[in-house]
Image (cartoon, rainbow, N blue to C red):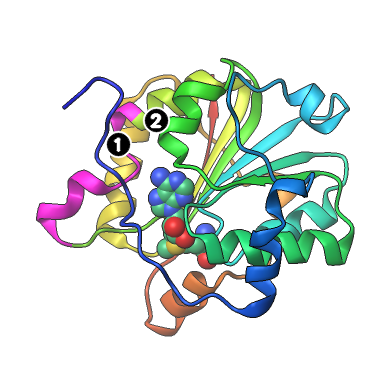
Amino acid sequence: MRNEEHIKSFVKRSGRITNVQRYFLKNKKNNHNFFTPTETINLYKLFDNKNPCVLDIGFGDGKLLSNIAKINTNINFIGLEVYESGIGNILKQIEKSNLSNLKVSNIDAVSFLKKYVQNNSFYGISLFFPDPWPKKRHYKRRIINANFLENMLMKIKKNGFVKIVTDWENYGERIIELLDENKKFEKIQDISIYKERILTKFEKRGISQGNRIIDLTYKAK
Ligand SMILES: C[S@@+](CC[C@H](N)C(=O)[O-])C[C@H]1O[C@@H](n2cnc3c(N)ncnc32)[C@H](O)[C@@H]1O
């Protein structure tokens, strides 16, 4: 495996795309809420202000992320999603709510962090219901592992946070183990941005199946 390659935490598949999603995808290059990084990002330039910035990885249908951005106008948000339908969806939501503090990209979060993000730049990084890859032989595809935690740690500021929510018990327990083993993280109470957040599709499904929701917030010491 070449150095910059890594095992992908997703499998690219062409899902169903609605007409509205297609419209936004077709015009995404001219949409200032969409960006494709080609060099290290300057967050101040990207948002034209110095507000703290939170990165959300794998926003899915985008409803939670756009809702949080709408409520927290003094914080900037970057959302990453590899599925195009999600990008089309969130661009529609950003336009509808006229949000200037949320920008999105259609890029693998692992490459994004490594190639385009300065160290000590984010206020926080969130992952809501990362793909659990339940079969043991697929655990290697899980996005959260010791390396990825280190990469996240490097990219957040001192006292910045990492928030991870899952309903997959065995993944959640492993994440707790990894966070506790990494002595540079410290468990904290939930931070105010996420108080009274709406439930995501995956969270609703987990609850309806009787799964325990493991909701973790850690700060970088
Ligand atoms: C189970 S879904 C959860 C979606 C959303 N956060 C929610 O709770 O509804 C996981 C999402 O992560 C995205 N994803 C997986 N690996 C990714 C990666 N390396 N970079 C960006 N997005 C990724 C997938 O495309 C998928 O939409």
Residue under the point 69% across and 75% down? 20
- Which residue was labeled with disc 2? 149
Question: Number of callouts in the render?
Answer: 2
Q: State the image quarter where residue 1 is shown.
A: top left
SS at badge 1: loop
Separation (CA) of disc 2 from disc 1:
6 Å
Q: Are marks 2 and 1 in contact (CB under 8 Å)?
A: yes
Residue type, mark 2 in image:
Leu
Q: Is residue 208 above or below residue 82?
A: below
**Which SS type dominates the magenta stretch?**
helix
**The C terminus - image quarter:** top right
Depth order, front residue of 78/217: 78
> Visible in this render: residue 16?
yes
Percent position (x, y) of residue 216? 49, 47
Tell me the crowding category of disc 2: few under 14, some 14 to 19, or many 20 or more residues within 10 angstroms, Cα based. some
Q: Which numbered marker is on residue 216?
A: none
Camera-nearest residue between 203 and 6:
6
Q: Which range of residues does the magenta coloring cover?
A: 135-147
Is residue 144 one of those drawn in magenta? yes
The disc placed on residue 145 is 1
**Residue 196 against residue 162 in the figure, above or below:** below
